[in-house]
Image (cartoon, rainbow, N blue to C red):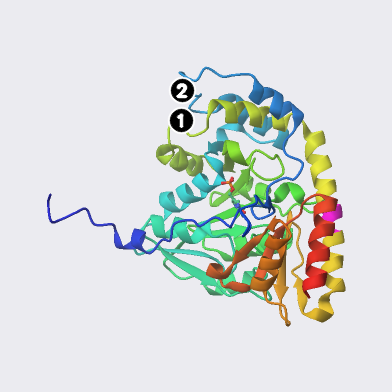
Amino acid sequence: MSDTRPTMKPWIEKIHAYVPGKSKGSDGRELVKLSANENPLGCSEAALAALAQPAVPARYPDPDATALRAKIAEVHGLDPARIVCGTGSDELLNLAAQGFAGPGDEVLYARYSFVVYKIAARRCGATPVEAPDVDYATDVDELLGSVTEKTRVVFLANPNNPTGTFLPRGEIERLHAGLPSDVLLVVDQAYGEYLEDGEDDGGMALAEAHDNVLVTRTFSKIYGLAGERIGWATGAPHLIDALNRIRGPFNVTNSGQKAAIAGLGDQGFVVKSREANNRELARFAETIAGIGNHGLRGVPSKANFLLVLFEGRLTAEAALGALAEGGYAVRHLPGQGLPHGLRITIGTPEQMDEIAEILRKAA
Ligand code: PMP
């Protein structure tokens, strides 16, 4: 055997492999998973029916996801030539960093934002830079104040994960207007479908009007198709061209393309999911506010989860344990600077009642 071996690139060495939350309780019981922001209603019946029709496994999928891009374009009023699909939006976020940043460059995002931004920056050898938050929310002035001549890509999740906070249209426009035109702004709208009518953050309009804005979306959240791994991005032709050059040629499976098309065709399911989520989110936020005198605080959320901060006697760690004892897995993110918070996905009314009861007792 040789005494030398391939050496990992130093920027790859800095990446920690993804560690999923615990899925089993101390007694080995499977926990109810409210840790990954999945849709508790599952997916549309139409998507299920599409998945039940077997594709030909020996055949590669359409490399350009032509029918899926056409359906996305139809539903969102976009040009299919300005859309690219990915293996989840994760792939597209990584490609955006890789396409436009490299060693010596900086990739900027807010503290307490989606964990993939840091990984995406590191994967391409760029330096991740975190702008300070303001009480857990992304702050446009802080982001703009963190831009240097090395900044090449800015990521912004809206609503944001893991905080659920939301920046209105005026703020996104102000951020874009303050950025040099050669910096790519990626507006990650993974939770965009949970916004009520009239709450559009304007990201799509910016992506249509400017050469330096990319919007990403996913079928993993409200569409309930996380297991199929499908995301998409829209932006100016040269942005889409860059992503097409470096994506996997067959990056969306046959079944994923079919299920996503069927899901898009059932907007009734999307509306039902949004209404159920927003009703339960409001109710859960109120419950947490009701135990606020015990040091629990919910960060205002417009997504399908609530970040609960534990600022009193009950620690997030102890609450995580109590919830696991009660049969629930939620997300504790000490590695993201949130040892004092739990991100709890909004589940069914019964699940949220149980969670509220467990937290009330533990507090
Ligand atoms: N962006 C944000 C803000 C997310 O929270 C997630 C999922 N956790 C994603 C992107 C990626 O989702 P997917 O790769 O499943 O499309």
Q: Main secondary structure of the magenta part?
A: helix
Q: Is residue 21 above or below residue 295?
A: above
Q: Is residue 327 above or below residue 95?
A: below
Task: For mark 1, give the secondary structure.
Answer: loop
- Whether residue 210 appears in this view of the structure is yes
Q: Residue at x 80, y 46 (%)?
A: 274
Which comes before the other along the chain, label 2 or label 1?
2
* Quadrant location of the C terminus in the rendered image: bottom right
The answer to if 279 sits in the magenta stretch is yes
Quarter of the image where one finds residue 151: bottom left
Q: Nearer the viewer, residue 205 or 324?
A: 324
Residue 126: horizontal and vertical position, in percent? 39, 61
Quarter of the image where one finds residue 226: top right
Crowd tier of the residue under label 2, counting other residues whose Cα lies within 10 Å: few below 14, some 14–19, many 20 or above? some
Task: For mark 2, give the secondary structure.
Answer: loop
- Whether residue 165 appears in this view of the structure is no
Residue 235: horizontal and vertical position, in percent? 57, 44
**Can you name the residue that lies furthest to the front here?**
27
* Three-letter code for the amino acid on which mark 1 is drawn: Phe
State if disc 1 and disc 2 touch (CB < 8 Å): yes
Q: Which residues are magenta?
A: 278-282
Q: Which residue is mark 1?
A: 250
Left/right placement of residue 147 relative to residue 300 reads left
The answer to if 132 sits in the magenta stretch is no
Residue 144: horizontal and vertical position, in percent? 57, 70
* Three-letter code for the amino acid on which mark 2 is drawn: Tyr
Left/right placement of residue 173 relative to residue 355 reads left
Q: Residue at x 77, y 75 (%)?
A: 296
Q: Residue 60's mark?
A: 2
Q: Residue at x 59, y 31 (%)?
A: 256
Q: State the separation of the CA atoms marked 2 and 1.
A: 7 Å
| Callout 1: CB less than 8 Å from ligand 1 | no
